[in-house]
């Protein structure tokens, strides 16, 4: 039996939860599901430029786990862009927390 997943901390939820290629009807699209924790990993590392070890600490996961989230998320995003698929953001084992000034300093 696999080990239960640790609840990941995320600090933001997007307003838009679905992205699709323009001009393609939904009935013709395949969806890639991007989890909230994968999106948070992408946001912290690729958008905010935070080192993986620090981003992992913020999410309360190990750096190797964060690296696996990044790899999975980047593959799903690339597949959607290259192959004209939709991206739906949903799911994952996470808890939304507000980032305090103290946690900003701790990284």
Image (cartoon, rainbow, N blue to C red):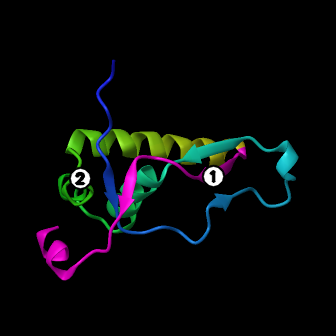
Residue 64 position, x and y percent, is 24, 39
The residue shown at (63%, 43%) is 32
> Which image quarter holds the N terminus?
top left
* Quadrant of residue 106 within the rendered picture: bottom left
Residue that carries the numbered disc 2 in the rendered image: 56
The residue shown at (47%, 46%) is 74
Residue that carries the numbered disc 1 in the rendered image: 88
The residue shown at (53%, 68%) is 14
Residue 20 position, x and y percent, is 72, 56
| Label 1, label 2: how far apart the Cα atoms are | 23 Å
Which contiguous range is marked in magenta?
84-107
- Seen from the viewer's position, the closer of residues 22 and 10 is 10
* Quadrant of residue 89 within the rendered picture: bottom right
Q: Is residue 16 left or right of residue 100?
A: right
Q: In this view, does 22 lie to the left or right of 58?
A: right
Whether the magenta-drawn stretch holds residue 93 is answered as: yes
Q: Which mark is residue 107?
A: none
Among numbered discs 1 and 2, the one appearing first in the sequence:
2
The relative height of residue 16 versus residue 86 in the rendered view (above or below) is below
Label 2: which secondary element: helix
Whether the magenta-drawn stretch holds residue 88 is answered as: yes
Do the CB atoms of the residues marked 1 and 2 lie less than 8 Å apart? Answer: no
Local crowd at mark 2 within 10 Å, few (<14), some, or many (≥20)?
many
Considering every residue shown, the one lying at the far bottom of the view is 101
The residue shown at (72%, 46%) is 84
Residue 8 position, x and y percent, is 32, 51
Tag count: 2
> Which image quarter holds the C terminus?
bottom left
Q: In this view, does 71 lie to the left or right of 34?
A: left
The relative height of residue 25 versus residue 65 in the rendered view (above or below) is below
Label 1: which secondary element: strand
């Amino acid at each position: 039996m696999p080990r239960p997943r640790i609840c990941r901390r995320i600090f933001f939820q997007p307003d838009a939860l679905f992205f699709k290629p323009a001009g393609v009807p939904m009935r013709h699209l395949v969806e890639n599901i991007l989890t909230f924790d994968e999106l948070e990993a992408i946001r912290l590392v690729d958008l905010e430029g935070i080192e993986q070890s620090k981003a992992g600490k913020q999410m309360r996961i190990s750096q190797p786990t964060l690296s696996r989230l990044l790899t999975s998320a980047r593959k799903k995003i690339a597949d959607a862009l290259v192959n004209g698929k939709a991206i739906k953001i949903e799911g994952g084992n996470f808890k939304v927390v507000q980032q305090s000034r103290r946690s900003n300093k701790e990284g």
